[in-house]
Amino acid sequence: MASASRATLRVARPTWLCMKAITMFSVTVALAAALAGMACAPMAALPRRAIELNTAGAHALVQGDLSVAEACLSVALEYSPRFVEAWVNLGYVELRRGNFEQARRDFARARDLNQDIPAPHHALGLLADKDGRGEEAERHYRAALKVDPGFAPARANLARRLFSRGQYEDAREQFERLEQVAPDAVTGWAGDAEALLQLGRDAEAERVVAVARERLGDAPALMLLLGRERLARGEWEDAEAALAPLVGDSDRSRACAALAWIAVGRVGRGDSAGALAAARAALAIDRDDETARYALVLASRR
């Protein structure tokens, strides 16, 4: 069973466990940059009130109050029609509403006002990503990184895109760079380890997780990877101990992954009834989860 678990660690893609987190991380960082005024932009010529309104609009956007965000950002643009960051944030408002075409116009206007700011390029990449235009998204992410190699959201999303295409070595290169520009965020470390697992380099993945835990502690994404390490070794009880706290995670995709891997471990130690229960609980969250389906089949054969 240990060998079957090890194969599953690489072959099945049960959660996109770091990939879904990356998307959230990227949007959060982008909004944080907006709150900071995107320091690479020349701010001196902007009216103070415009800056204040942009910050208020970005806060409202983070909180999901799109009407307040739009009002603040629109007034900020009345004060300063060439305020790049406000145009980007206004585009995010439209993106959240599903108004893709208006979002594209806002992002494009921001980019055209100043092509030397990474945020508009990245925003256009997010829009293309959401619209299923992957190659275009990558071009925008690379354009953002050409302007600012340290712009973490674009680095994270480029790595995610490469991973999704199965270019694990290239994805890992981007995740390693993300570790350098955002060392206190779990995304780069988890993505690096996940890519190494897909490449069959389990020992290297374990070292990455160990270093990340030393720096960041027992972050949920790292504990999910730790549980998978323990499964690969056939350490069933230790694996479940690492995974069990994640079952109640507010990120339901992570909770689903934890349940699915717990099911694999229970099959490994001969607890078919427990495996069936965990697999069914995972499938209740995501009926297409590959690892849960794998565990369900194995447990049903016992």
Image: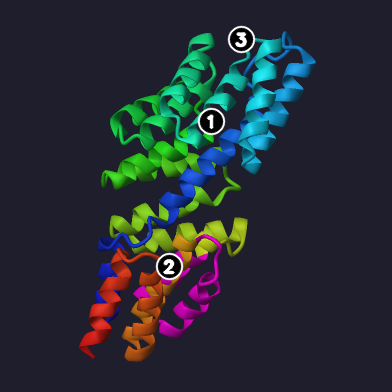
- In whole angstroms, how far apart are the C-alphas of marks 2 and 1? 29 Å
* Residue 247 included in the magenta stretch of the image: yes
Report the side of 229 relative to 267 (left or right).
right
Amino acid type assigned to the residue bearing label 1 in the image: Tyr
Mark 2 neighbour density, 10 Å: few (under 14) some (14–19) many (20 or more): many
Amino acid at pointer 3: Arg
The answer to the question of whether label 1 and label 3 lie on touching residues, with beta carbons closer than 8 A, is no
Which is more foreground, mark 2 or mark 1? 1
User: From this viewpoint, is residue 229 visible?
Assistant: no
The residue depicted at 61 percent of the width and 48 percent of the height is 184
Question: Residue 54 location, x and y as percent?
Answer: 69, 24
Q: Position of residue 100 (x, y in %)?
A: 42, 29
> Element under label 3?
loop
Pointer 2 or 1: first along the chain: 1
Residue 63, quarter of the rendered image:
top right
Residue 148: x and y in percent read 52, 24
Residue on which disc 1 sits = 92
Q: Is residue 182 visible?
A: yes
Q: Is residue 101 above or below residue 200?
A: above
Mark 2 lies on residue: 256
Q: Which residue in the structure is indicated by mark 3? A: 82
Of all residues, the one furthest to the front in this rendering is: 67
Q: Is residue 229 magenta?
A: yes
Residue 141 is drawn in which quadrant? top left
